[in-house]
Every structure is written in C-alpha cells, then in structure tokens.
C-alpha cells in the first residue's frame, strides 16, 4: 500500500509540476487567448464548422466533450468559466455552466489545456442533434479576474449506438 501511495503521490506531483514549462502558460506575460476544440483526454484542434461527435454517456445522457487551449492566463488553480451553445435545427437552446475549470500547462499544445468540459444536450430523441450546427461560446475568468472568450461553430454528428 505504501509503495502504491508514494507512486500515486509522485504521479500527482509530476502532473501538477511544470505549470510554467512554456512561456504561454504564464499569466500576465502576453495577450490572453482561448480556443475551443475536442477534449476527449487531450486537446485537439477543430476547424470552424468541423465535425464534433456527440458522446453517449452510460446513463443515457448525451454531451459534446470540449477541450480548451488558453494562453497567458493566471490559472495555477481552478478558474471559473461558462460554456453555452445554441443549436440550429432544434427548438431548444442548451446552456451549461461550468463553475470551475482545471487548466494544465501543455508545452506541446503551447499553452494551458483543459479537457473533459462537457456541454450537455438535454433532448432524449434519438438522432435529433445529428446534422445540427452548434454555436458554442466559452468564457473563462482567470485568477487575476481577466476575462477571455471564444466562439466556434461545429457540425454535430450523432452516431446512434
């Protein structure tokens, strides 16, 4: 148990360390930016009007898994933010508020990355979101109170299991 716990602590320290391994991971040293992309485990760029596949959760819910790439934010700890979207082709507008987001320095992505941000879509009708366009907006407030926002249009693909 002790070996497992010390390994777990070392992994945790390695994951938290390196928060400033890249200049873009440091707040107040440049103009803050924010990008929206895929967020299944890691950040992946997505072009405007790129496809984003709807994730079907084990309890029947459906969501878009968003990744965020930020630069020059003070985000050594959890930061607050909102994620909202409106969808064409449906009568519903969905909004999801994320109270806290966790950003980690990713030198490969050249900035601070937050993954696993779920935009929950609340219509149980199978296939209703397939082919719709989601207009997604994300706003983040860093630890210094700096606000940064990004918007992106994505084509929702619903592969019904």
Image (spheres, rainbow, N blue to C red):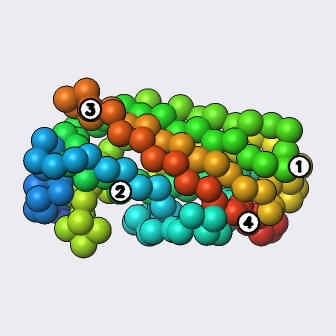
Whole-percent x, y for residue 60 in the image = 75, 50
Query: Looking at the image, which residue is at 10% across and 47% down?
Result: 29
Q: Which mark is residue 157?
A: 4
Disc number lying in front (3 or 1): 3
Label 3 and label 1: CA atoms lie apart by: 39 Å
User: Callout 2: helix, strand or loop?
Assistant: strand
Residue at the disc numbered 3: 146
Q: Which mark is residue 69?
A: 2
Crowding near the residue tagged with mark 1, few <14, some 14–19, many ≥20 C-alpha atoms within 10 Å = few
Residue at the disc numbered 1: 125
Query: Looking at the image, which residue is at 15% across and 44% down?
Result: 27
Query: Looking at the image, which residue is at 51% across and 68% down?
Result: 46
User: Callout 1: helix, strand or loop?
Assistant: loop
Circle nearer the N terminus (4, 2): 2
Label 4 and label 2: CA atoms lie apart by: 22 Å
**How many numbered tags mark residues here?**
4
From the image, which quarter does the N terminus lie in? bottom left
User: Callout 4: helix, strand or loop?
Assistant: strand
Whole-percent x, y for residue 160 in the image = 81, 66
Circle nearer the N terminus (3, 4): 3
Work out whether residue 99 or residue 85 is closer to the camera in this orientation and state it: 85
Q: Which mark is residue 114?
A: none
- Residue contact between numbered discs 4 and 2, judged by CB atoms under 8 Å: no
Is residue 115 toward the left or the right of residue 61 in the image? left
């Amino acid at each position: 148990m002790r070996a497992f716990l010390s390994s777990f602590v070392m992994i945790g320290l390695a994951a938290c360390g390196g928060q400033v391994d890249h200049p873009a991971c440091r707040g107040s040293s440049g103009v803050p930016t924010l990008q929206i992309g895929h967020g299944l485990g890691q950040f992946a760029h997505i072009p405007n009007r790129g496809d984003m596949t709807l994730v079907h959760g084990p309890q029947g819910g459906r969501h878009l898994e968003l990744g965020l790439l930020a630069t020059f934010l003070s985000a050594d700890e959890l930061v607050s933010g909102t994620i909202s979207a409106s969808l064409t082709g449906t009568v519903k507008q969905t909004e999801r508020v994320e109270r806290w987001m966790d950003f980690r320095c990713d030198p490969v992505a050249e900035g601070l990355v937050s993954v696993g941000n779920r935009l929950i879509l609340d219509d149980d009708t199978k296939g209703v979101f397939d082919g719709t366009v989601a207009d997604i907006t994300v706003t983040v407030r860093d630890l210094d109170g700096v606000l940064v926002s990004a918007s992106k249009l994505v084509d929702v693909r619903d592969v019904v299991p």
